[in-house]
Amino acid sequence: MADKKKCAAEVVSQKLVSEGIYSMWLSFPERQDIAATAVPGQFLSLYCKDGSRLLPRPISICEIDREEGRIRIVYRVVGRGTEEFSKLTAGDTVAVVGPLGNGFTVHEGRSILIGGGIGIPPMLELAKSIPGEVSVVLGYRDSDLFLKEEFEPYAAVYVSTEDGSVGTKGNVIDAILEQGLDADVIYACGPLPMLRGVKDYAAKKGIPAQISMEEKMACGIGACLACVCQSKERDAHSNVGNKRVCKDGPVFDAQEIEL
Amino acid sequence: MNLAIDFAGVAMKNPVTTASGTFGSGAEYSEFVDLGELGAVTTKGVANVPWPGNPTPRICETYGGMLNAIGLQNPGIDLFIERDIPFLRKYDTRIIVNVCGRTPEEYVEVVRRLGTEDVDLLEINISCPNVEAGGLAFGQDPKLVEKITSQIKDAAKQPVIMKLSPNVTDIVQVAQAAEAGGADAVSLINTLTGMKIDISRRTFALANKTGGLSGPAVKPVAVRMVYQTAQAVKIPVLGMGGICTAEDALEFIMAGASMVAVGTANFHNPSATVDIIRGIEAFMRENQVEDIRELIGCVR
């Protein structure tokens, strides 16, 4: 069914939450289904107005307000495209497609949610919606602990910092070990070295881990094969063991992906 | 008002198709556009066996365009025949299968396999800048182009479109070589070989170092090459290179393209193909053009 469409989202609010990191709430006057169907771990493709920048920017969903039909994204300015988005203010519009990709699959039992750097935002909606005993482990570079307070109503929150200024000095796995955290399932989003650590830790403990991957994308919908990652098994779509991060992911079972 | 055309002996409801590699085999974009509205769907290149493609990053954005070095990742002809052709056949559109290979024998093997399949045209990629063997190696030498074209024509049961590279000194010579080899049509342009440096990491933006430039940045080069080619050969020309709007498509048509392909624009607007078809209709209505064929090559 050809019922998906690039549409105009309206900026409800935008604010700076940390150096170079912005939080923006979007509403979708043309498409009620976007917020209604979105799940944690999925992303939106945002398009620039400047015609010299053609490709959509995939940005993960931080929070979903289904009642108001709104979605929040929290993103870092890394180039001219995200810089353009950061200048938008309430009432402005931005073209979007979404929600895209496969989100986290929630399991019963005790869970650890791990976010590193700009991989922290997508864990917030998951923390809000996940049942059972939840621990959240957030990895930061330094004492700039963006979004940390927003997790606190929903979970026990632990922090690691690279410079040791707050919480455990080191990475998120160091924090898990120091706190003696235990779980039946792990959910994680963050930089590649962190995901490797999570994958190894989960394998050693024999617990399932879902990780959200990132790769440079062009189409964002699974057609162009730009954003592939290597899977352990030859997958049905590519026939060569190249999973599409945008379409088959971005959330994968950690043990099925070669990192 | 008539948008229908005949392209290399195949009747098309309109002159708009997709550029190979930007549209998969249509499944993903079928959620955004009714594939039955397109004149044809041109599939991503398929080889005799599955190809894994290049390491990532495979793409990067450039001013008004993008570089890609996917490396012709494809699932191989067996799975393509089993899955992709039946999928596309559900739609009232023509199927153009893009074929890639490393050696003449590999191209011929795929072409033979497709001979018994329900597809309408073959497009032969002798111009991919992102694979070491095959591809561009064939497309830059007119003698090799003529030879491989005639080998493929001997094996083919469907009309053959040779896809040409812009990375040549004289596109006319290559187009004429394809025609001399028996090609039923030519398509152009494939991407222009380019490079981007990531200055913060002091390395190449693409793992493959070089990639193919596409998007609106290449359009004037493409229009010029389509014009030169259409002037020089009798076989029809499928024009592409940076088409984002109906106006862009009409430039190619007026320059001599009987059909046009929409590529990188799909990434910017997943409905670009049908938006362009509607835009061409609107242009014809506004300008009292009864038949699209009046516009093909009208600028000389």
Image (tube, coloured by chain):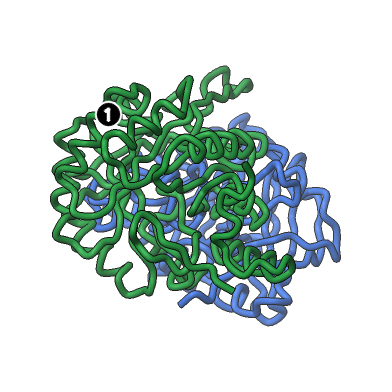
Chain colours: A blue, B green
Residue A146, compared with residue A90, is above or below; it is above
Percent from the top left, x then y, of residue B268? 60, 53
Percent from the top left, x then y, of residue B97? 30, 53
Quarter-of-image position of residue A88: bottom right
Q: Which is nearer the eye, B201 or A132?
A: B201
Residue B85, compared with residue A259, is above or below; it is below
Residue B111, compared with residue B58, is above or below; it is below
Q: Which residue is drawn at 30% across and 27% down?
A: B138
Residue flagged by tag 1: what amino acid is it? Answer: Gly
Q: What kind of element bears circle 1?
A: loop
- Give the side of residue B102 with respect to residue A145, left or right: left
Q: Which residue is drawn at 73% across and 45% down?
A: A21
The answer to whether residue B69 of the structure is visible from this angle is yes
Q: State the count of labels.
A: 1
According to the picture, the residue beneath numbered tag 1 turns out to be B134
Quarter of the image for the C terminus of chain B: give it. top right
Percent from the top left, x then y, of residue B85? 26, 64
The answer to whether residue A154 of the structure is visible from this angle is no
- Give the side of residue A155 with respect to residue A69, left or right: left
Q: Which is nearer the eye, A102 or A211?
A: A102
